[in-house]
Amino acid sequence: MCYPRGEFLVGEVDVRLGEVDGEPFYMSRSQFEYWKHTQLILDVVPGRGGQFSLDSPEGLRFHIRSRVFDDVEIKGLRAAGRI
């Protein structure tokens, strides 16, 4: 879900993954444990969203693609303490 800045209450179970266009991007810790070996790629594409987020009124929607990190990337992420 996408919330206006300040409307998402970040809790102890949320992990900040990074930023999207300068805005913070979070995932729950349980989701992160499942996806931590995966690169998530967030795009905006034409179409209607699920009408549960900010994406629906503009004729655009979010689209997430993913790929599993390779062994070299996993090693680098572990060395950096990211996973």
Image: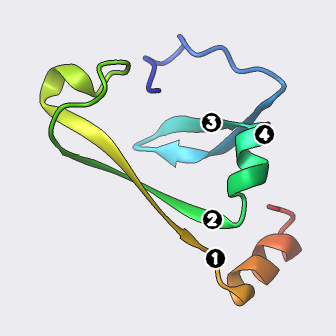
CB under 8 Å between discs 2 and 1 = yes
SS for callout 3:
strand
SS for callout 1:
loop
Q: Which residue is mark 2?
A: 38
Structural crowding at the residue carrying mark 3, measured as other residues with C-alpha within 10 Å and reported as few (<14), some (14–19) or many (≥20) = some
Q: How many marks?
A: 4
* Quarter containing the C terminus: bottom right
What amino acid type should be assigned to the residue bearing mark 3? Tyr
Placement of 20 over or under 82, stated as above or below: above
CB under 8 Å between discs 4 and 2 = no
Q: Which residue is mark 3?
A: 26
Placement of 38 over or under 27, stated as above or below: below
Residue, far top: 7
SS for callout 4:
helix
Q: In the figure, is residue 65 to the left or right of 59?
A: right
Q: Nearer the viewer, mark 1 or mark 3?
A: 1
- The alpha-carbon separation of the residues under discs 1 and 4 comes to 19 Å
CB under 8 Å between discs 4 and 3 = no
Q: Residue at x 62, y 36 (%)?
A: 26
Q: Position of residue 2 (x, y in %)?
A: 44, 26
Q: Nearer the viewer, residue 15 or 5?
A: 15
Q: Residue at x 85, y 72 (%)?
A: 78
Residue 30 marker:
4
Q: Residue at x 45, y 19 (%)?
A: 3
Structural crowding at the residue carrying mark 4, measured as other residues with C-alpha within 10 Å and reported as few (<14), some (14–19) or many (≥20) = few
Q: Which residue is mark 1?
A: 69
- The alpha-carbon separation of the residues under discs 2 and 1 comes to 5 Å
